């Protein structure tokens, strides 16, 4: 799957969760299309790729589709995560209640600040970054959440790669480089802000008559 | 623009910034397509919508395209932002260096914790949430970053709407409701985690021979 398709699956899944809360058993392709802002035919293509079969009129089974999407994104497989950088962002993420839904468990945490080392973060003892190589061998973490200052992001990423981590969720505002066998997911918080900026513009009362486009 | 198109523009912009750092003056539609995982013809449609004209062989001017995308997303217009909830996440975001690039300035900050009220956050004095209505009239903030605990997210969102805020960047893991004239951008941190989960699966050595799909 390409990024644009992953993006659609994530938005479908969010819509399915909303439908579930409202007690709906079926989701129409229009409801799914509306969640992402794509055409109904694009949704049907995605559903075919997921091998999900809809019922005429009622649509796709919410429960079945949830399973198929979660399975496609591999959310059911248990995965260990290390939090590297236990500042404000590391703490906020560790406590955000986001891990379980994606199959992750925080199993290790690291920082360089002596005041933080030894403290507990979501039940895990924060260790010094120097201990990372050995610690990650003891507590298998397939991935790490990189919440360190931008200036040291690449150095710490290298350390993680050497320790055998297979994926990095990077919150630094620079791209970090890694060998081909390690995946990097850059979390671009600016994107949310840019989307908000655009939506605000849309909702602003126009000063000039709106154009026909 | 629909969400999927905004998503593409944001990824094009990120790619343009990378190209700029490398000193490139032009971006081909293939380079842009690759940044999002869409077809070259989809890129050309987006470029037409932006009224960007490419040169044969070399592609689109990086500088011109940057201006067109930033303009389409309204990133040049100065916008005031209030941080509501100055816990770990509020602090991390305030200091993340993401605001200016999207045209935002943090102009106000609020919390209910007496230990935080009166402290400074990125040069702004944290005020008590009770002061929000009057304070936002003094310091115009078109939008607010909602970084409060999930349980109070809707109550605080209502307060923001009453205070005249036009947009909310919601980090709570629940949807907040607002009247039609207020835009809500839900920041789904899980999405990054789900994408990482999928990418890890892709890169895992298969245990069974890969299927033909």
Image (cartoon, coloured by chain):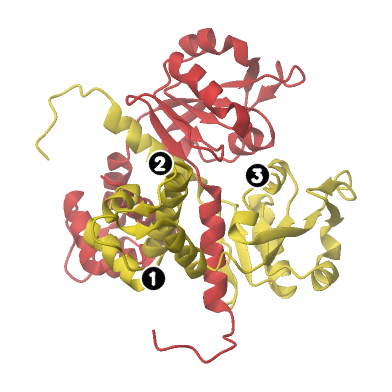
Chain colours: A yellow, B red
Residue A8: image tag: none
**Residue position marked by numbered label 3 in the rendering:** A96
Q: Is residue B10 above or below residue B106?
A: below
Q: Chain of mark 1?
A: A
Q: Is residue A211 left or right of residue B81?
A: left
Mark 2–mark 3 Cα distance, whole angstroms, equals 23 Å
**Are both tags, 1 and 2, on one chain?**
yes
**Residue position marked by numbered label 2 in the rendering:** A194
Q: Is residue A27 left or right of residue B95?
A: left
Please, what secondary structure does the residue beneath circle 2 have? helix
**Are both tags, 3 and 1, on one chain?**
yes
**Residue position marked by numbered label 1 in the rendering:** A50
Give coordinates of residue B150: x percent, y percent.
60, 34
Kindly give the residue lying farthest to the bottom in the view shown. B209
Please, what secondary structure does the residue beneath circle 1 have? loop
Q: Disc 2 vs disc 3: Cβ atoms closer than 8 Å?
A: no
Q: Disc 3 vs disc 1: Cβ atoms closer than 8 Å?
A: no
Pair 2/3: label in front = 3
Give coordinates of residue A97: x percent, y percent.
65, 47
Mark 1–mark 2 Cα distance, whole angstroms, equals 31 Å
């Amino acid at each position: 799957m390409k990024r644009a398709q992953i993006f659609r699956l994530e938005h479908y899944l969010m819509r399915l969760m909303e439908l579930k809360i409202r007690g709906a058993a079926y989701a129409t392709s229009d409801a799914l299309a509306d969640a992402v802002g794509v055409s109904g035919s694009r949704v049907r293509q995605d559903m075919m790729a997921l091998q999900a079969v809809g019922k005429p009129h009622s649509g796709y089974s919410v429960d079945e589709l949830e399973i198929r999407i979660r399975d496609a994104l591999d959310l059911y497989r248990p995965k260990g995560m290390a939090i590297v950088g236990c500042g404000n962002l590391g703490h906020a993420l560790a406590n955000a209640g986001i891990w379980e839904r994606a199959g992750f468990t925080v199993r290790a945490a690291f920082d360089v600040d002596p005041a933080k080392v030894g403290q507990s973060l979501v039940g895990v003892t924060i260790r010094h970054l120097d201990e990372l190589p050995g610690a990650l061998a003891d507590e298998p973490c397939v991935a790490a959440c990189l919440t360190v200052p931008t200036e040291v992001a690449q150095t710490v990423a290298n350390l993680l790669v050497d320790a055998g981590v297979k994926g990095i969720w990077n919150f630094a505002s620079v791209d970090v480089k890694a060998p081909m066998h390690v995946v990097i997911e850059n979390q671009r918080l600016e994107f949310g802000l840019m989307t908000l900026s655009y939506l605000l513009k849309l909702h602003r009362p126009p000063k000039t008559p709106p154009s026909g486009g």
